[in-house]
Image: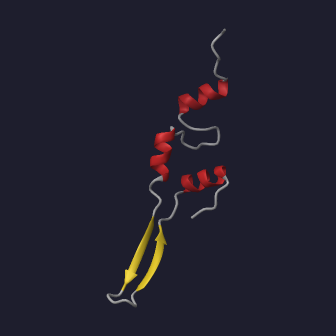
Amino acid sequence: MDKAKSSDAAILKKQAGTTADGWQIHSFNTLLAEMGTLCQNTCRAGQVKTDIRFNQFTEPTTYQMHIFDLLGLKKP
């Protein structure tokens, strides 16, 4: 059985390190690292039981928003 051959588009993508529409190519591990910068912080104001607490989310990058779109997920 012959070995599968890469398409011209796949070869160009690998050489350029970007997709046809200009997005950086990632491995699964580097994609997880890129997406792992998103976080939720619980902020607190005051020092007693009635202190105010709220959640603050980091702002996703353009690339992270693109990944959410590709996965069909709601953006944080």
User: What is the number of callouts on the image?
Assistant: 0
Q: Residue furthest front?
A: 49
**As rendered, which of 13 and 3 lies closer to the eye?**
3
- Looking at the rendered image, the quarter that the C terminus falls into is bottom right
- The residue positioned farthest toward the left in the image shown: 47
Q: How is the image coloured?
A: secondary structure
Q: State the residue at coordinates (64%, 21%).
A: 6
Q: In the image as oriented, which residue stretches furthest toward the top?
A: 1
- How far across and down, in percent of the image, does residue 45 sit? 37, 84
Give above or below for 20 relative to 38.
above
**41 left or right of 61 in image:** left
* Residue 16 placement: quadrant: top right
Question: Residue at left 60%, top 42%?
Answer: 22
Q: Nearer the viewer, residue 76 or 11?
A: 76
**For the point 46% across and 42% down, which residue is it?**
30
Q: Is residue 73 above or below residue 53?
A: above
Q: Position of residue 67 (x, y in %)?
A: 59, 51
Percent of width and height locating residue 19: 61, 38
Q: Position of residue 3 (x, y in %)?
A: 63, 13
Viewer-nearest residue: 60 or 40: 40
Placement of 26 over or under 59, stated as above or below:
above
Q: Is residue 46 left or right of residue 37?
A: left
Q: Nearer the viewer, residue 21 or 3?
A: 3
Residue at 63%, 28% (x, y): give it.
10
> Above or below — where is 57 with respect to 21?
below
Can you say which quadrant of the picture contains the N terminus? top right
